[in-house]
Image (cartoon, grey):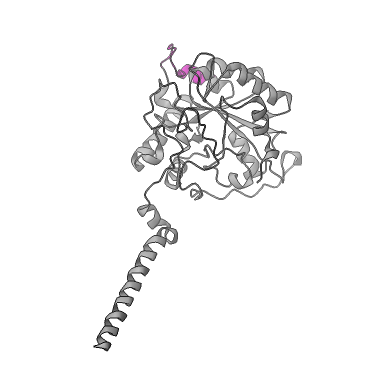
Amino acid sequence: MTKRKEYLLTTAIFLFCCIGSYFCWVYSAPNQFPVLSKALAVEAVQPVEAATSDHPATSDHPVTSDHPATPDQPATSDQPVDSDHSTAPIVPNPPKPPTPSGGAEAYTDNPVPVPILMYHKVNPYSASSLYRLWPEDFERQMQYLKDNGYHTVSINDVLDQFEKRKKLPDKPVVITLDDGYRDNYLYAFPILKKYGFTATFYIVTDYVAESGSEGTFMTWDEIKELDEAGMTIGCHTLNHCWLTRASWEEAWRQVGDSKTILEDFLGKKVDTFAYPYGAHNKWVSEVVYDWGFRSAVTVNPRPVSTANAEHPLQLNRMGIYSDLSYDGFVYKINTDNYNY
């Protein structure tokens, strides 16, 4: 009888160990097998933002790429919007620095961090919002940049510095404006021209207005004028879709069709992308890469440094909100205030 009990006890312990080992394997399998991870993973977008992909364009809150959970709380946390940010998309390694052939001053061995600034609305008439700056506040910030020796560059210039070691001007900064609001053309564009600055305008193509209209969003003619003035036009999907919540097929359509529409209209390559709501993960970044984008910007509020530039489809970008004081702006863009 005693031997029977020992046998049953031994068998139970053996089965318990087998079952425990099985569950341990299942838990660790996504990390051990990336392909299996993609098949098993359930997408988890952290609730930093409460906006949805069908946020109405006429809302007091703009269709922004980092809409917060409440109107009074900006998404200023360093925590990324998605749960897979630490996993870089499958992209080529940055090329080795070229060997200077004359004019060695054009190359650098020490790339500098670059702040990419994110704006939305700039006008004197919208309802109070974190994403609307008064034109005089926007101009005061631009004047500070000009008076203190900052130079605007494109995102491609930033990548050329880190990947090809091409030297940037002193105190480089990138200015971006999201969604294609018409006030960007009416108010921000003249101020940028006044100070000799360039910027990148990320366009939601389904929201572009017909020529001659005076609605919330820019017309195609106005976008064309920005492009001809030396501004960069970037892609922001068809209708500001929350890509990590969409199917793979829908994400593919949102990214690819909007790129095709812009390229067909402008007659040139469009190679920079902004994730709506900042939401991205590995497979979304792979879609962006497969469509031939060289860069994509997030809402992780830090300058682009050597480490971040290794993942050009996950570039940091710093939101400039209406509740940011003048002194706060000065502090935020000073790259010496960050640890890399």
Q: Nearer the viewer, residue 303 or 206?
A: 303
Residue 183 horizontal/vertical position (percent): 51, 17
Q: Tell me: residue 252, above or below residue 63.
A: below
User: What residue do we see at 35% from left, 73% from top?
Assistant: 17
Does residue 282 appear in the picture of this structure?
yes
In magenta stretch: residue 22: no
Q: Which residues are magenta?
A: 210-225
Residue 196 horizontal/vertical position (percent): 66, 21
User: What residue do we see at 70% from left, 29% from top?
Assistant: 150
Residue 176 horizontal/vertical position (percent): 56, 29
Q: Is residue 308 left or right of residue 35?
A: right
In magenta stretch: residue 214: yes
Q: Nearer the viewer, residue 111 or 135?
A: 135
Q: Nearer the viewer, residue 322 or 145?
A: 322
Which part of the image, by quadrant, shows the N terminus?
A: bottom left
- The number of numbered badges drawn on the structure is 0
Q: Nearer the viewer, residue 261 or 153?
A: 153
- Quarter occupied by residue 334: top right
- Main SS of the magenta segment? loop
